[in-house]
Image: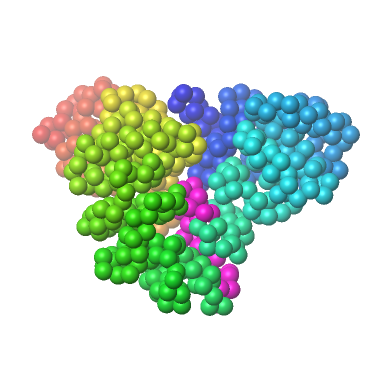
Amino acid sequence: MEQQEFQRLKTLKNIFPEDSWSWAITALRRNSAIWTEFDNPDFSQTLIQDIGAEPQEWTPGRIGAVLLAKDINEEIPFPIDSFDVLSAEIKGIVHQTYQEFEEKESETPDLVNGFLLALALLGEKGTGKSWTEILNQHKNRSNWQTPLVILFNLVKDPAAYLRHLNPELALQVLLSNPSTPESLVDILVEVVAYLDIADLEKWFKVIQKEVPDLVALVAQALLSSLDLTSGSIQDILNLSFLNSLAGHDDKALKLLEKAADQNQKLHGKVTANLTKIKSHLDESRVSDQAWKDLKGSLTKDDLSEENLTEVADIINSLLLNKQYAAIGDLVEKLPTPLPEHPELLIALSEYALEQEQSIRAEQLALQALNLSLDKPQENLSSVLLKAGLYRESAQAAQLYLEKYPNHLVSHLNYVEALRSQGNYGDAAQAALILTVLFPQDLILQRKLAGYLEEAEDWQEALEVRAAILTKQQTAIEQETTLNTSLPLNDLIAFANCAFSAKQYRRTVSACNQILAQDQENSPALSLKGKALCNLGQDEEGFAHLNRAV
């Protein structure tokens, strides 16, 4: 499966510029109706011919239009923002497809049918129905994700359309479109502006899960664009929340304390957020009122899902700052038996690991896994991996990647879990996928090259090592610095890999660069000597080997 996945990635890798891989290829991977089409070698060539090679043009809607045009041998006008612009023949096909899928509730539409169903929904909007009516009408059709993704490319106001979707589906729709990080920030700001604190938190929780690097950028952009100066409790809570996301915890704390002063009866969100922010700032909590209120709330018999999620978030914040006494103080108040809440169980398992309670940690993590088979959890594979439950960690990572195929930590956990079971070949194949999805992260690239070398996949490992050196050479050329040498560690790693790959000339070339920096570098002299001997230059080779000794 990993080999098939890597071949699809390589196809796009050869079309798109490298600086777009992390957002363009990851977008196309999100929708299986599009992604599986890349198994057909003619598919990408058709798109290049009809759309070009600009990644941002490869939207699900545009791709669907190209395939439909090919199927019916009729040009499809694009962009389409009205059902009325379509020909009578296409309208007839749309109506027929809509009727067929209305009768086949369990069938998942492929890409062409998904495009036709999106046109049908656009037509319903044209009859005067609101998006709320249309989406409610089809809310039970979880297999209609492709039409909803394509619809994003057809509507006149994409941000307004996204607001009508639940945050998880909205992010899935948005991130299925190849968009630069800057473009994503712009539309996310437009979508979440003016939401109340409850909805804002729901959206940002999903944004944090899907594109964590953008959270602070979106929060800061909102702070810069919104007028939250009325002094109302709602504005103060929003300001505090956004400041916290943007990394301004001191300011966020002062605003929350101001909200609490204005209304002494405020508990719930304010109590939980006060505690979370104080844990970020490493402030004492055990004696303050917010902490007491939080502990008091845990004695209730009717703890809600939201309450338990907040407690899990607080425990995770405390874990980051190694505030174990505070966690113990909180855990004492939790009901027995523990609620069947996966996020809370995962946080408690992590805490048990930190307390060296390995058996309890395993029990909690396995319980969380059993409870989350239908609702994959973000941190579960990490906890299972730390607990030494490698098979279960791989299972949890796979479950999460089925829903979020570009999640870096789950990918890394999956690779490490396979490797820890001695499955080096599959671990290397899974690692290859990451070399394409995250090409600019050199620390990650070095790690992935190591996985490939461990599996003795020398040619692929050498390609990754070469890419690392190329990126560093480009960075050196762009800097106004006197240092023009590549890092010795990366050159030595490349030389070792090249030798194992039997690329002896490349070994010699890398060793020459090392020796130019350090004339008596023993590993480089030894490698160069052995490579020269393999090239038939025994006399010079032995001379280098003698110098190495």
Query: For residue 443, which quarter of the picture?
Result: top left
Q: Which color scheme does this rendered protein use?
A: rainbow
State the image coordinates of residue 39 (x, y, percent, origin top left): 58, 24
* Residue drawn at point x = 19 percent, y = 26 percent: 539
Quadrant location, the C terminus: top left
Q: How many marks?
A: 0
- The residue positioned farthest toward the left in the image shown: 549
Q: Which residues are magenta?
A: 202-229
Query: For residue 221, which quarter of the picture?
Result: bottom right
> Taking the image as drawn, is residue 176 in sight?
yes
State the image coordinates of residue 356 (x, y, percent, origin top left): 18, 43
State the image coordinates of residue 237 (x, y, percent, origin top left): 49, 68
Q: Is residue 192 left or right of residue 427?
A: right
Q: Nearer the viewer, residue 508 or 493?
A: 493
Report if residue 203 lies within the magenta region: yes
Position of 470 relative to 113 (above/below): below
Position of 449 relative to 231 (above/below): above
Q: Is residue 73 left or right of residue 135?
A: right
> Taking the image as drawn, is residue 319 in sight?
no
- The residue positioned farthest toward the right in the image shown: 88
Q: Nearer the viewer, residue 449 or 186?
A: 186
Magenta part mainly helix, strand or loop?
Answer: helix
* Residue drawn at point x = 79 percent, y = 48 percent: 129
Report if residue 222 lies within the magenta region: yes
Position of 108 relative to 187 (above/below): above
Q: Nearer the viewer, residue 119 or 36?
A: 119
State the image coordinates of residue 442 (x, y, percent, origin top left): 37, 45
* Residue drawn at point x = 42 percent, y = 74 percent: 264
* Residue drawn at point x = 45 percent, y = 62 percent: 269
Query: For residue 123, which quarter of the picture?
Result: top right
